[in-house]
Image (cartoon, helix red, strand yellow):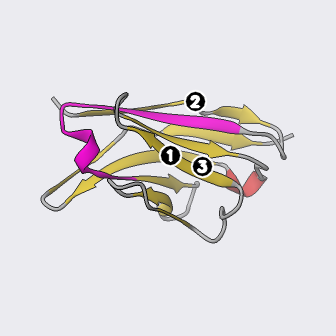
């Protein structure tokens, strides 16, 4: 059974940091590109960061220089380190596993940036 389970969300003050984790099971994690998306209330889901199976990364312009995506294939886990958080980063954050013929979503974790 395929599972992606996000954790690490919560309430943080502007300028603070959070580290999200997404633990995968039920598929060959190392073969998959992993992505973090977010969806704010009333807005469309947007791609935040992307890491390929070989470790290449890309970021949305809005988070470049503040967020870092990484993966640990031994732990079947992808991370999103979020620094210098802003109120506009408030959203539900989702991880997604992508491969040529299949893709899987996690259930999401809420991140709220507020004073």
**In this picture, is 70 found above or below 48?**
above
For discs 2 and 3, the disc positioned in front in the rendered view: 2
Task: Tell me how far mark 3 sits from mark 1, CA to CA.
Answer: 20 Å
Q: Residues within 10 Å of mark 2 (few under 14, many from 20)?
A: some
Taking the magenta stretch, the answer to whether it contains residue 20 is yes
For discs 3 and 1, the disc positioned in front in the rendered view: 1
Instruction: For mark 3, give the secondary structure.
Output: strand
Task: Tell me how far mark 2 sits from mark 3, CA to CA.
Answer: 13 Å
The residue at 66%/67% (across/down) is 62
Q: Which residue is mark 2?
A: 8
Closer to the camera in the image, 4 or 40: 4
Question: Is 58 left, or right, of 66 in this rendering?
Answer: left
- Start-end of magenta stretch: 18-34
Q: Which residue is mark 3?
A: 91
Whole-percent x, y for residue 87 in the image: 77, 52
Instruction: For mark 1, give the secondary structure.
Output: strand
Question: Which mark, by number, is residue 70?
Answer: 1
Task: Tell me how far mark 1 sits from mark 2, CA to CA.
Answer: 15 Å
**In this picture, is 104 found above or below 50?**
above
Badge 2 or badge 3: first in the primary sequence: 2
Badge 1 or badge 2: first in the primary sequence: 2
Question: Is 78 left, or right, of 12 in this rendering?
Answer: left
């Amino acid at each position: 059974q395929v599972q992606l389970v996000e954790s690490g969300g919560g309430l943080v003050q502007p300028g603070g940091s959070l580290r999200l984790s997404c633990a995968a099971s039920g598929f060959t994690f190392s073969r998959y590109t992993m992505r973090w998306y977010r969806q704010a209330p009333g807005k469309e889901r947007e791609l935040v960061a992307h890491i390929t199976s070989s470790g290449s990364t890309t970021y949305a312009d809005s988070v470049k220089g503040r967020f870092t995506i990484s993966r640990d294939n031994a732990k079947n886990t992808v991370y999103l380190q979020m620094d210098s958080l802003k109120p506009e980063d408030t959203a539900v954050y989702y991880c997604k596993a992508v491969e040529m013929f299949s893709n899987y979503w996690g259930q999401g974790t809420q991140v709220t940036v507020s004073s």
